[in-house]
Structures are given as structure tokens and as C-alpha cells.
Image (cartoon, rainbow, N blue to C red):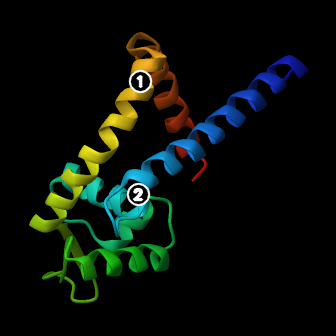
Amino acid sequence: MSDSASNLAVSLFSEILAVDQLARASMARVLPKGMELSHFSVLNHLAHAGVERSPAQLAKTFHLTRGAMTNTLHKLEWAGWVHIRPDWDDARRKMVAISPSGQAALAAALAAIAPVIAEVVGNVGEDKVRIALPVLREMRLLLSRFD
């Protein structure tokens, strides 16, 4: 890789990491009381998946240890936002689903973060965002190979 390409790559990843940090902080600030960004992410995933997931599947999806995911799931269960039940086919495993109150909490979170996201997209411009999305998706897919 040439020095120019190397500098470009470093600049790109520096910007991505800075945007990630600022986006997380902006979203965390407006989430409903008691909800953490990790809670929102898991609830959003479960709602979009539409099916139960095991803690191991969720840990893999979020690139976390099983222990870290178990901790998050216990907090979500305590809040009443997920149901955790034994797997009927394998008693050693558990299955996780979003609860009705989890759906409501997710809807409140989405309503809270929507204005933040809309303002950023509006200021950047929808056309630029549409151009950036395929590039970011391709980068995500390429980086997922390293897991």
C-alpha cells in the first residue's frame, strides 16, 4: 500500500471511529431513563428478527462474550423488556424474545433518537447518505471476515 493510500485508510477509519463515538454519545443522551445503548441494540435486533434468539446467537451477532451478553439480558429481563425461557429442545440453552413492554420501550427509544438522526441526515443531505450507505455496508461485510 502506498503512503497516500495508507494515509487515506487511516483518515477514513479515524473518521468512522469518531462518528461512532459521537453517534453513541448523542443517542445515549436521549434514550429513555434506564435504557442503555446496549439495551436498545438488543431490543432493536430482537424486534427486527421477529424470532427468538439464544444468548449465544446474540453474543455472536454483537461480537460480545457470552458473559457480557448474559449481563445485558439479565438487565433487560429485570426491566421486563425481554422474556427468557428454557429451550424446549435442549434444556441447557435458553431462548430470548422481546416482550410487549420491550416493544413499547423500543418505540419510545426510537421516538427519542429519531430527531437526532433526522437532524444529522438532514444537515448532511439525503443524497450524500444514500451514496455513503453502500460503501459502509461493503466495509462492514469485509471487516466481518476478520471475526
> Residue at 33% of width from left, 35% of height from top?
115
Residue 80 on image: x %, y %: 19, 76
Rendered position, 87 above or below 91: above
If the image is split into quadrants, where does the N terminus sit? top right
Residue 100 visible (yes or no) = yes
Local crowd size for mark 1, using a 10 Å CA cut-off: few (<14), some (14–19), many (≥20): some
Mark positioned earlier in the residue sequence (2 or 1) = 2
Which is more toward the observer, 40 or 68? 40
Residue 57 on image: x %, y %: 35, 65
Circles 2 and 1 in contact, beta carbons < 8 Å: no
Amino acid carrying label 2: it is: Thr
Q: Secondary structure at mark 1?
A: helix
Q: Is residue 118 left or right of residue 107?
A: right
Q: Would you identify the image quadrant in which residue 126 lies? A: top left
Residue 61 on image: x %, y %: 41, 57
List the single residue furthest toward the bottom. Answer: 91
Amino acid carrying label 1: it is: Val
Q: Is residue 18 left or right of residue 41?
A: right
The residue pinned by badge 2 equals 61
> Residue at 39% of width from left, 20% of height from top?
122
Which is more toward the observer, 30 or 56? 30
Which is more toward the observer, 87 or 16? 16
Residue 100 on image: x %, y %: 9, 65
Q: Is residue 100 left or right of residue 90?
A: left
The residue pinned by badge 1 equals 121
For the residues marked 2 and 1, what is the alpha-carbon distance in whole angstroms? 26 Å
Rendered position, 71 above or below 97: below
Q: Secondary structure at mark 2?
A: helix
Q: Is residue 3 left or right of residue 28?
A: right
> Residue at 29% of width from left, 54% of height from top?
45
